[in-house]
Structure formats: structure tokens, C-alpha cells
Image: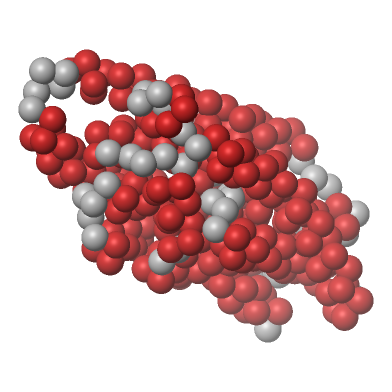
Amino acid sequence: MATIAIVVIALAFDYTNGFHDAANAIATSVSTRALTPRAALAMAAVMNLAGAFAGEQVAKTVGKGIIAAPQGDQGLVIVAAALFGAIAWNLITWRLGLPSSSTHALIGGLVGAALAGAQTVYWSGVVDKVVIPMIVSPIIGFTVAYLLMVAILWAFRRRNPHKVTRGFRVAQTVSAAGMAFGHGLQDAQKTMGLIVMALVVGGYQTDYDVPIWVTVAAACAISAGTYAGGWRIMRTLGRRIIELDPPRGFAAEATAAGVLYTTAFVYQAPVSTTHTITSSILGAGATKRLSAVRWGVAGNIVSAWVLTIPAAALVSAASYGILALIFL
């Protein structure tokens, strides 16, 4: 029963991940009017579902590369506490309209629960697969989006601006779909990894391969959450950072999708879709002029990024203490 309860909690986290991070995939295409909000959410839900079936490398990294969860009840309590920490941070930042990282909330939850339970944290895995990508991926997103937008401006400098805008509105339907696929590829797999960890410590399987029912359940949960929408965060990403036009929206989405695919397939690293798309929006937007970016809003977002792992870790550590008193 305990393992079943944790699977349900994990799927609840996956659902919050969907509505919290729905804006990652579609905020730019909605803000540029390339897609209507409901059409964008429906497309994002379908592509999240497809992305979840595209691999399991990230799931294995989360399942066995961050902490060593013990067998039995203590391991299950650690997984549950990690999920409570991640869900709590997701709900807090969603309420505030801040696009923080569900990925890092989950990683922080795992680390906090493991430390509270006096279990091993694979710090080399945390540094190599989480901290370094957390720093590098936004830098790459900003730089590549900036350069791509400069290339677009140069290539279309002599074209009719209205025709260019219409063309990139069409192109944004493709780039937004690619971004949503990358979100499913990255974020649904993280929940799969947690469910597999629960199955292993609960004694239901011995390896970290992802059963098909876990993939289906995680894919459906994140898709349902995505369709529920994340309007608060969508406003922040789509309009409060900078007013985007379709070419810049395309550059941001195409760049972010490329970073997500590379980190998932090549490095098996659970990077933040939020960090990636936000930095890409900043990079593409900075080609207007640096003053066009509302750096105060961007600073609030960065503050939320810095706080995510320790905040989720503290909540999960407190959750572990409470759950341990009840169940251990």
C-alpha cells in the first residue's frame, strides 16, 4: 500500500509539473499570437505525451544517480518526503507566478530527504548532472538564441516585415511543438525515475528499467496538467520579461528545444526546461536592445532559481521528520 501511495503522490507531482511548466512550451507562441491559448495547451499536452515515450535516460539518472535510497520503509519515506518538498515548492512558485524549476525542486527534495534520513547523496552525480547543467544550459540558451536571432535579422533584413512576421507565426507552431516534446522528454522522465526508485526500494523490481505502465501513467499525468494550464507563469514568461515578436519567439523556442534534446539524449542530464526557455527568451529579446528586457523581473526569476534546491530540500527534510515519526 505504501508503494501505491507514493506512486499516486508522484503522479500528483507530475500533474503539478504539467500546469506549472505548461508556460515553458507555449508562452512565447501565445504572446506573439501564433497560437490561441487553448490550441497551444492542447498541442503542448499531445507533444508532452509523445516526448515522455522518447527515452528513459533521464529517468535512470534521477532514479539511481542522485541518492542511494535504502530498501524498505525508510526508502519509501525518503521518496515520499522528496515528492512533498517538490510539490510544495511548485505550488508556492506557481501562486507567485514565478517560473522556477520543477526539476531542481525534485532534486532538492531528494537531497534534503536523503540527508535528513542519514543516507548517501551522490554529490558527484549532483554536480555533474545537475549543478553544471544548471549553470551551463542557461548560458548556452541565452547565447545561441541571441546568435540565432541575429542571423534571422540579417537573413530577412530586406524582406517585407509583415510577411516575415506571418511566416514566423507559422514557424512558431513547429518550434512550440518541439519545445513541448522536449518538456515531455525531460520532465515526465524525472517522475518516471522517482516511481521506479519507489518500486525498487519497495521490493517490486530490482533494476531501474522503466515499465511501460510507468511511462504511460507519467505521460498522461503531465499531459493532463499541461492542459489544465499555467496562466500565471505564462504571463510572466510571455509578456513581463519582454514583449516578443514571432521571429524572436521562434528563436527562443528552437534554441530551448535543441538544448533539451541534447542534454537528454547525449548527456542524460535532467536540466530545467524553465531555465532553458527563460534564458533563451532573454537572449532573443536582447537583440532588440538590452534595455528592452525587464531585468528586474528577470532578477526575481533568477532568485527563485537559486532558492529552489535549498528551499525544496528544507521542506522535504521537514517532511521526512514528520513521516519518520509516523511510519518508522
Residue 280 falls in image quadrant: top left
Q: Residue furthest bottom?
A: 1
Q: Residue at x 46, y 33 (%)?
A: 293
**Which residue is rendered at x = 12% and y = 41% of the image?**
166
Q: Is residue 62 left or right of residue 274?
A: right
Horizontally, is 116 left or right of 1 in the view?
right
Total numbered badges shown on the rendered structure? 0
Within the image, what quadrant is residue 112 found in? bottom right
Can residue 161 be spotted in the picture?
Answer: yes
Coloured how? secondary structure
Picture quadrant where residue 78 is located: bottom right
Q: Position of residue 248 (x, y in %)?
A: 30, 34
- Which corner quadrant holds the N terminus? bottom right
Residue under the point 89% across and 68% down: 321
Q: Nearer the viewer, residue 29 or 60?
A: 29
- Measured as percent of width and height from the top left, residue 13 is found at 58, 67
Q: Locate the C terminus and report the quarter of the image it occupies.
A: bottom right
Question: Is there any visible trace of residue 254 in the rendered image?
Answer: no
Residue at left offset 62%, top offset 73%? 9
Q: Position of residue 216 (x, y in %)?
A: 41, 67
Would residue 251 be found to the left or right of residue 302 on screen?
A: left
Is residue 64 toward the left or the right of residue 59 in the image?
A: right
Residue 140 image point, x, y percent: 48, 25
Q: In terms of depth relative to the viewer, which is nearer, 241 or 48?
A: 241
Please name whichever residue, 202 or 58, is drawn nearer the observer in this view of the structure. 58
